[in-house]
Image (cartoon, grey):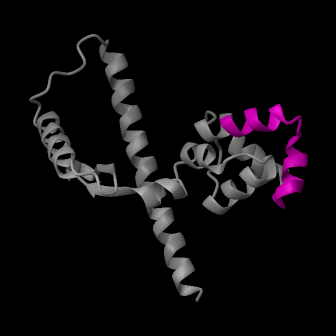
Amino acid sequence: MPPTEFGNLLRALRAQRGLRLQDLADKTGLTHVTVGDWERGKRNPKRANVEAIAAALEVDPEPLLLAAGFVPTSAARTETRVELPGGYALQVPQGDPNAALIASITEAALRAISAGQVEKMPDLTPEQQREVEDGMRRARRKREAAAREQAREAEAEGSGD
């Protein structure tokens, strides 16, 4: 499995600080195997582990959270999720007076795309079009998995009271 955006970012941050896998593992209480698996894209971290990594590296956790497919805490506070057909969702700033308009335009565009009313990317070869479409499907699956994980975490936090 190729390295992920999170894995590449983690490796770069670790290297910038001159840390070995074992050094970072020691700082976080994780194993060097786990950290290495994340860097190589073999496993996906939990949100709490991403936050622990950011603390150990002394960096803002938001870029790491985004790269790992999580919604950063600040975005969760300042944006509203608008569900759209086809499993898509749109993040709009809370209180944005244009939120309904943005959502309806986006929804209309998605309907037109799914109905075949929008021309496929003509400047791309068929292979490039497949790659883009595959990437979009992977991104949607990643967002859905992140949403499920956040729901599980919220449920676990709620039941831990």
Left or right: residue 20 compared with residue 2: right
Magenta span contains residue 27: yes
In the image, residue 133 above or below residue 75: above
Depicted 13 relative to depicted 57: above or below: above
Residue located 74% across and 32% down the image: 12
Quarter holding the C terminus is: bottom right
Q: Which quarter of the image is occupied by the N terminus?
A: top right
Q: Is residue 62 left or right of residue 106?
A: right
Given residues 100 and 64, the one toward you in this image is: 100
119 part of magenta stretch: no
The picture places residue 80, in percent across and down from the top left corner, at 34, 58
Quarter residue 132 falls in: top left
Q: Position of residue 73 (x, y in %)?
A: 53, 58
Q: Which residue shows up at 85% across the image and 52% down it? A: 25
Quick check: 10 left or right of 74?
A: right
Is residue 40 visible in the rendered image? The answer is no
Magenta-colored span = 9-30
Occupied quadrant, residue 140:
top left
**Measured along the vertical axis of the image, is residue 119 above or below residue 48?**
above
Provide residue 151's location: percent of width, then percent of height: 46, 69
| Magenta stretch prevailing secondary structure | helix
Residue at the extreme bottom: 161
Q: Residue at x 49, y 64 (%)?
A: 150
Q: How many marks?
A: 0
Q: Which residue is at 10% across, 36% downward?
A: 115
Q: Is residue 45 left or right of residue 70?
A: right
Instruction: Tell me, yes or no, if residue 150 can be seen here.
Output: yes
Q: Position of residue 47 (x, y in %)?
A: 61, 59
Quadrant assignment, res 139: top left
